[in-house]
């Protein structure tokens, strides 16, 4: 068996054995593959991006949505049964005021009037005025429970406001009797 060895002296690309890639080329290639393999998955995680993580939603955001939904329900009942307007309009306005104050405290923007108008609400027109009041009473009870729960979980700086909203919703139940 005859071994052949070709050595180039003075050449930085020293070749040993059959012609092909030098050791430097192989080492550079392996290093490049390792570098790309290590940084490839990191580019998808936002580590190198300038995008900050979005802030978590405020825990009081559902109360804003709930207040606007209740106001829309009252407005729908007033439209369906105009004879209830004097009784229900102040309650609808109170819910809008609650939503506005919650939005101010949380630093969120209220949806536009057109977006709020398209919020699906129970159809109070399906039946009588007493059926509409019953539906409103049920929705108001759920809203009061949500506000009371939020009050117990809210930080001290917000608990008074949320407690006031829960109390107001309890008085709304009396208006609906």
Image (tube, grey):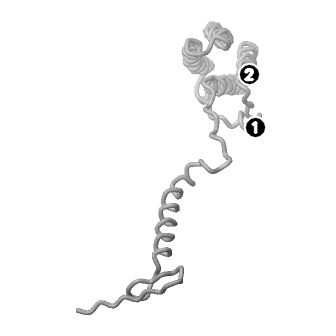
Question: Considering depth in this image, is 137 or 61 the residue closer to the camera?
Answer: 61
Q: Give x and y (percent) for residue 132.
A: 61, 21
20 sits left or right of 80 in the view: left
Question: Considering depth in this image, is 3 or 50 the residue closer to the camera?
Answer: 3
Quick one: SS at disc 2? helix
Task: Say whether residue 134 is visible.
Answer: no
Where does label 2 land, which residue?
96
- Above or below, comparing residue 45 to residue 28 in the picture: above
Identify the mark nearer the N-term, 2 or 1. Answer: 2
Residue lying at the far left in this picture: please name it: 1
Where does label 1 land, which residue?
114
Residue lying at the far front in this picture: please name it: 9
- In the image, what residue occupies the spot 22% across and 92% down? 1
Q: Quadrant of residue 95?
A: top right
Q: Classify the position of the C terminus by image quarter.
A: top right
- Above or below, comparing residue 131 to residue 10 in the picture: above
Q: Quadrant of residue 131?
A: top right
- In the image, what residue occupies the spot 63% across and 23% down? 60
Distance from disc 2 to disc 1, alpha carbons, whole Å, reads: 14 Å
Local crowd size for mark 2, using a 10 Å CA cut-off: few (<14), some (14–19), many (≥20): many
Question: Considering depth in this image, is 128 or 117 the residue closer to the camera?
Answer: 117
Task: Say whether residue 26 is visible.
Answer: yes
- In the image, what residue occupies the spot 63% across and 19% down? 129
Residue lying at the far bottom in this picture: please name it: 2
Q: Give x and y (percent) for residue 34.
A: 47, 62
Q: Give x and y (percent) for residue 139.
A: 57, 20
- Above or below, comparing residue 109 to residue 93 in the picture: below
Quick one: SS at disc 1? helix
Q: Which mark is residue 175?
A: none
- In the image, what residue occupies the spot 67% across and 46% down? 51
Local crowd size for mark 1, using a 10 Å CA cut-off: few (<14), some (14–19), many (≥20): few
């Amino acid at each position: 068996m005859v071994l052949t060895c070709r050595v180039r002296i003075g050449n930085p690309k020293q070749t040993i054995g059959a012609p092909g890639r030098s050791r430097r080329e192989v080492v550079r290639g392996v290093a490049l593959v390792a570098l790309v393999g290590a940084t490839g998955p990191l580019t998808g995680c936002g580590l190198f991006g300038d995008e900050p993580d979005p802030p978590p939603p405020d825990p009081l955001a559902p109360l804003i949505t709930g207040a606007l939904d209740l106001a829309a329900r009252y407005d729908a009942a007033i439209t369906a049964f105009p004879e209830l307007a004097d009784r229900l309009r102040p309650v609808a306005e109170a819910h809008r005021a609650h939503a506005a104050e919650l939005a101010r405290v949380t630093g969120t923007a209220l949806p536009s009037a057109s977006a709020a108008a398209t919020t699906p609400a129970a159809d109070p027109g399906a039946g009588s005025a007493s059926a509409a009041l019953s539906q409103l009473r049920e929705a108001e009870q759920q809203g009061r429970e949500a506000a009371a729960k939020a009050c117990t979980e809210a930080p001290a700086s917000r608990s008074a406001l949320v407690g006031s909203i829960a109390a107001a919703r309890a008085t709304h139940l009396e208006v609906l009797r």
